C-alpha cells in the first residue's frame, strides 16, 4: 500500500509460544517466507481449528484435511505460532486454538465476503513491500477483477513524495484491490471519492459512534488526524481504463506512531481494540457496494459527489491552502465540480484544484 496522491496514472500513451514438546525428527521449524504469499494451508488449519474450537484436533485429522503429513502439520503449526496465532498442544495430543486470531487470512475472510466481487481471489502476505505495487504488477499480468492483496506488514509503504506510510505488523489494514471497470480515465477520481465513502461507512458499521471526516480527495480523519489514506492507480489508454488498483490503508490498533506522524487509529479514538478481520470484511463489502453502483447505475457519479460533500467538512466553507503543487493557492472551499475536483474561492475568483495537498489555513 502507498499513498502519494489521490491518483497516479500509468498510461499506454506515455502520458505466542505454548507448551514445549520434542520436535519430530528430521523436521525443522521454518519461519514464513517473508515477501511471498502466505501458505494457503495455514488458513485451512486455522479454519479447521475454529470449526472445532471446543475440542483438541489431532495432527492426523489436520494432515488428512490438508492432504499432508503429520510432520508437515507440526511445521505449519510452528509458522502459525510465529505469526502470533495462539495454538495449544503438540503432535502427541493434537492442537486447539486458545483465541481466534486477528489475521487477515483468506480462509477467515472468504466466508464473510460471499456475494461480493472480492470472495474468490484473496492473496495474503505475512510481509510485503507494497500491496499496491504487487497488485499493479499482478493486474498487468492479467489478474482478474476483484483480486485482493492483504498484508500483515509493509516494508515499503509509500507516502506522498518521499514520505512513507507506517505499516506496523498486524495492527492496521493494508489492502489493495484490482478493478477492471468499463470507465473512461476521467472517472477515476470519482472512484477514489467512492472508496472514501466506503471506508467511512465500514468504520461506522463496526462502531456506529465513530464517524470519520472525509478530506478531499483521499484521506479520512478522526480528531483532525489521519486514520486512513487511499491511493488509486491505473493503467489506461486515452479513452478507456485497462485496470485500476485501489489501495486502502487504515490505522486500526496502533497505539503510537513514529517520529512526527500526525496520525491516529481507531483504537486510540475509541479507547478499545478493534477486530481487523471484522473491519477488513466491512471495508471490502462496502467497497463492493460502492463500486457496483458506480459501474451499474447511470446516476451513481452524481450520488457519489453529493454524498461525499454531505459527509465532509472540507468540501464547503473550509478555509484551506493548497500545497505541493506548481501553483499554491489559499481560499475557502466551495464544493466539487461535476468531475469531482475541488472548487476554491480565492482572491482571484473561483479556482479548480486539480491536485496538491489540502491543509487547513491557520
Image (cartoon, rainbow, N blue to C red):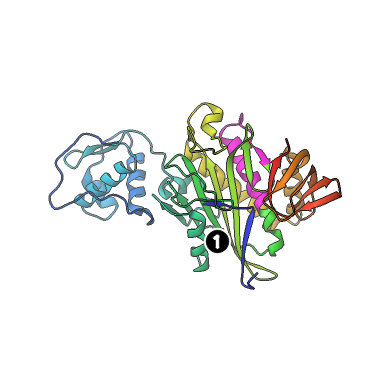
Classify 356 as above or below 282. Answer: below
Left or right position of 110 against 232: left
- Indicate yes or no whether the magenta region holds residue 232: no
The quarter of the image holding the C terminus is top right
Corner quadrant of residue 333: top right
Residue occupied by mark 1: 145
Residue at 36%, 34% (x, y): give it: 99
- Indicate yes or no whether the magenta region holds residue 207: yes
* Number of other residues with Cα within 10 Å of mark 1, as a class: few under 14, some 14 to 19, many 20 or more: some
Corner quadrant of residue 168: top left
Residue at 54%, 38% (x, y): give it: 260
Question: Magenta segment, which residues?
Answer: 192-214
- Residue 323 at x, y = what percent? 69, 48
Q: Nearer the viewer, residue 167 or 164?
A: 164
Q: Element at badge 1? A: loop
- Residue 125 at x, y = what percent? 41, 52
Classify 140 as above or below 345. Answer: below
Q: Nearer the viewer, residue 107 or 322?
A: 322
Determine the main secondary structure of the stretch shown in magenta: helix
Classify 266 as above or below 309. Answer: above
Left or right position of 35 against 176: left
- Residue 220 at x, y = what percent? 63, 41
Residue at 69%, 51% (x, y): give it: 356
Q: Nearer the viewer, residue 352 or 330?
A: 330
Amino acid at each position: 500500500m502507498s499513498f502519494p496522491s489521490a491518483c497516479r496514472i500509468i498510461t499506454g500513451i506515455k502520458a505466542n509460544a505454548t507448551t514445549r514438546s520434542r520436535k519430530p525428527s528430521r523436521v525443522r521449524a521454518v519461519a514464513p517466507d517473508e515477501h511471498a504469499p502466505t501458505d494457503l494451508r495455514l488458513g485451512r488449519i486455522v479454519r479447521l481449528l475454529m470449526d472445532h474450537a471446543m475440542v483438541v484436533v489431532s495432527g492426523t485429522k489436520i494432515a488428512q484435511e490438508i492432504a499432508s503429513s503429520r510432520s508437515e502439520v507440526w511445521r505449519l503449526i510452528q509458522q502459525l505460532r510465529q505469526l502470533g496465532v495462539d495454538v495449544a498442544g503438540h503432535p502427541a495430543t493434537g492442537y486447539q486454538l486458545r483465541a481466534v486470531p486477528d489475521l487477515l487470512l483468506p480462509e477467515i475472510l472468504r466466508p464473510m465476503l460471499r456475494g461480493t466481487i472480492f470472495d474468490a481471489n484473496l492473496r495474503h502476505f505475512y510481509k510485503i513491500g507494497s500491496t499496491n505495487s504487487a497488485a499493479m504488477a499482478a493486474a498487468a499480468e492479467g489478474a482478474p477483477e476483484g483480486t485482493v492483496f492483504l498484508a500483515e506488514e509493509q516494508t515499503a509503504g509509500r507516502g506522498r513524495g518521499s514520505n512513507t506510510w507506517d505499516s506496523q505488523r498486524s495492527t492496521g489494514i493494508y489492502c489493495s484491490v484490482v478493478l477492471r471497470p468499463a470507465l473512461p480515465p476521467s472517472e477515476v477520481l470519482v472512484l477514489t471519492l467512492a472508496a472514501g465513502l466506503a471506508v467511512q461507512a465500514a468504520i461506522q458499521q463496526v462502531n456506529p459512534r465513530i464517524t470519520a471526516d472525509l478530506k478531499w480527495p483521499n484521506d479520512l480523519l478522526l480528531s483532525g488526524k489521519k486514520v486512513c489514506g487511499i491511493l488509486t492507480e491505473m493503467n489506461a489508454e486515452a479513452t478507456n481504463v485497462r485496470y485500476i488498483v485501489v489501495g486502502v490503508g487504515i490505522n486500526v490498533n496502533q497505539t503510537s506512531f513514529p517520529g512526527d506522524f500526525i496520525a491516529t487509529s481507531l483504537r486510540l479514538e475509541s479507547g478499545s481494540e478493534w477486530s481487523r478481520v471484522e473491519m477488513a470484511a466491512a471495508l471490502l463489502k462496502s467497497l463492493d457496494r460502492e463500486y457496483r453502483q458506480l459501474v451499474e447505475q447511470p446516476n451513481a457519479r452524481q450520488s457519489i459527489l453529493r454524498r461525499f460533500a454531505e459527509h465532509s467538512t472540507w468540501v464547503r466553507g473550509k478555509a484551506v491552502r493548497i500545497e505541493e503543487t506548481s501553483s499554491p493557492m489559499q481560499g475557502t472551499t466551495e464544493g466539487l465540480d461535476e468531475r469531482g475536483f475541488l472548487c476554491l474561492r480565492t482572491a482571484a475568483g473561483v479556482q479548480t484544484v486539480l491536485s496538491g495537498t489540502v491543509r487547513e489555513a491557520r
